[in-house]
Image: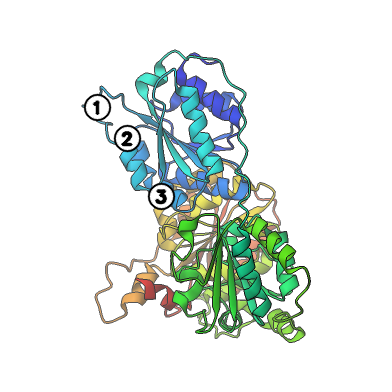
Amino acid sequence: MTNTVADQVGTYLAQLGVGHAFGVVGSGNFVITNALRRAGVPFTATRHEGGAATMADAYARMSGEVAVLSVHQGCGLTNAATGIGEAAKSRTPMIVLAAETAASAIHSNFAMDQKAFAESMGAVAERIHSPASALADTLRAYRTAVRQRRTVVLNLPLDVQAAEPVGQMPTDTVEPAPGVAPSLEQVNALTEALRNSLRPVFIAGRGGRGAKEEIQALAHDVGALVATSAVAKGLFNGDDFNLGISGGFSSPLTAELISQADLILSFGCALNMWTMRHGTLIGEETTVAQIDIEDANLGAHRPVDIGIVGDSAATATALREALLNDLGERYRTEEIKERIANEARWDQTDTPDLGEPGVSIDPRELSKRVNELLPAERIVSIDSGNFMGYPSQYLDVPDEFGFCFTQAFQAIGLGLYTSIGAALAQPDRMPVLGTGDGGFLMGAQELETAVRLKLPLVVIVYNDAAYAAEVHHFGSDVDLDTVIFPDTDIAALARGYGATGITVRDVADLDQLADWVNSNPQAPIVIDAKIANDGGSWWLAEAFKGH
């Protein structure tokens, strides 16, 4: 049914293969959203466009499909701005269907320069220009999302949407861009560095997530330890020489072994201040090599000795072929293996219990116990704040598709949205969210969406009644009234939305979580954990060096 251009565009996007759609429907995007639904694209109606944007982002990251965000003209698009900015910075393949006032409607309350607005967020701005160009415009937007891994805002003027469609539906298919092979000169330079290295460490980021087998095979051949940036957590699970997350979240042993490397090789990782602790994880004599599919990314955050334009899988394969043989154990010694097994995790590191029984719980003890109680098949999402290192490091995930980290914009409040989108992308896993009280309350309206979807979502609220990052950053010698709040009964708020809500002040209170897990839950549980003051989490001091 393609009575209008809006119907035609929605149907064509479904045919091209978009995944789940999210949004808030108004008059400007009503027809195209229903066209998507009729064509078989699942749609989740959210309570705010900001929630819909990040749900779409998380869904695309965890499913491998192009997600869709559908918004009303003007204010619908601006409401979604933070989520679109996060997706754009993360190079998430996503299409934003943004209704737009007609060019002649300059006095409409909804009129604005949507193209400039989209570009200001780092997204690619496209438009359905006319009925005659509608199919070509749609294909161009979809191809950009898939082949360039970009977030595309496709503006849909209302007068063009309502027009009669032109042309027959094509049968185009769009394949991902082929792998980029490195040049022989670049391969030879890195091969020489690998031969000369005695303590190599590989760090994989978002760009390494599709190259696990190739990177691990090369690491074995050259005796390298492996680690990831936060976004790729879980990629090297099962490898005896996996150090976990590199950077501010690193355990003491992980930081020690990375800082002692004589060669750090990055696979699709920016080597930014977070992953390298402002460069402190790089030794004075360490050779730094970076592999990325875009030349502009090489050395963007810090100088590199060897820069290679190529995708992670193709480059790792080319390096193995050039090396021809195994270089020996090098950094993969039995001693290092044993140390990693016994010391690499934060829950293997002795820390004092800061909790006060019946009053507050240590965030580390909370995280450890939750990790024990939840099923292994889970998908963990993280909001932003002082607390965020605890769920990131203490909660295990099954693989790189079990961890969703929407932190490119460093926005507080995206966590609940992230967890819902991730849950829909991985429906066979229990969704888990780590959030602070500030972030949770920013997006609490989407708890109704999770209840409506019957998601067995575990929401861990690390509740210290403050924007704790600011509290610890500015210290006690200043007026902190702007970032400290009265205690909020978040458990009661959750029950008001139809979720289970529990208050946790010590480890024994988490027995209620165990009962919930065993009850075949059909709605979320929100854990209002009254956490003890940690004086600023271990990663926070590192983070604020960049502010």
In primary-sequence order, the first of circles 3 and 2 is 2
Residue 74 numbered tag: 2
The amino acid type found where label 1 is placed reads Ser
Which quadrant: the C terminus?
bottom left
Q: Are marks 3 and 2 in contact (CB under 8 Å)?
A: no
Q: Residue at x 45, y 40 (%)?
A: 152
Q: Nearer the viewer, residue 306 or 471?
A: 306
The amino acid type found where label 2 is placed reads Gly
Residue 79 position in % (x across, y down): 36, 43
In primary-sequence order, the first of circles 1 and 3 is 3
Cα separation between marks 3 and 2? 16 Å
Q: Which residue is mark 3?
A: 85
Rendered position, 146 above or below 276: above
Specify whether residue 532 is in view: no
Rendered position, 101 above or below 405: above
Q: For the residues carrying marks 3 and 2, which lies nearer the camera in this image?
A: 3
Rendered position, 143 above or below 206: above
Q: Which residue is mark 1?
A: 108
Q: Residue at x 24, y 30 (%)?
A: 109
Q: Residue at x 28, y 31 (%)?
A: 110
User: Seen in the image, is 417 located left or right of residue 17?
Assistant: left
Residue 64 position in % (x across, y down): 62, 46
Cα separation between marks 2 and 1? 10 Å
Q: Nearer the viewer, residue 465 or 271?
A: 271
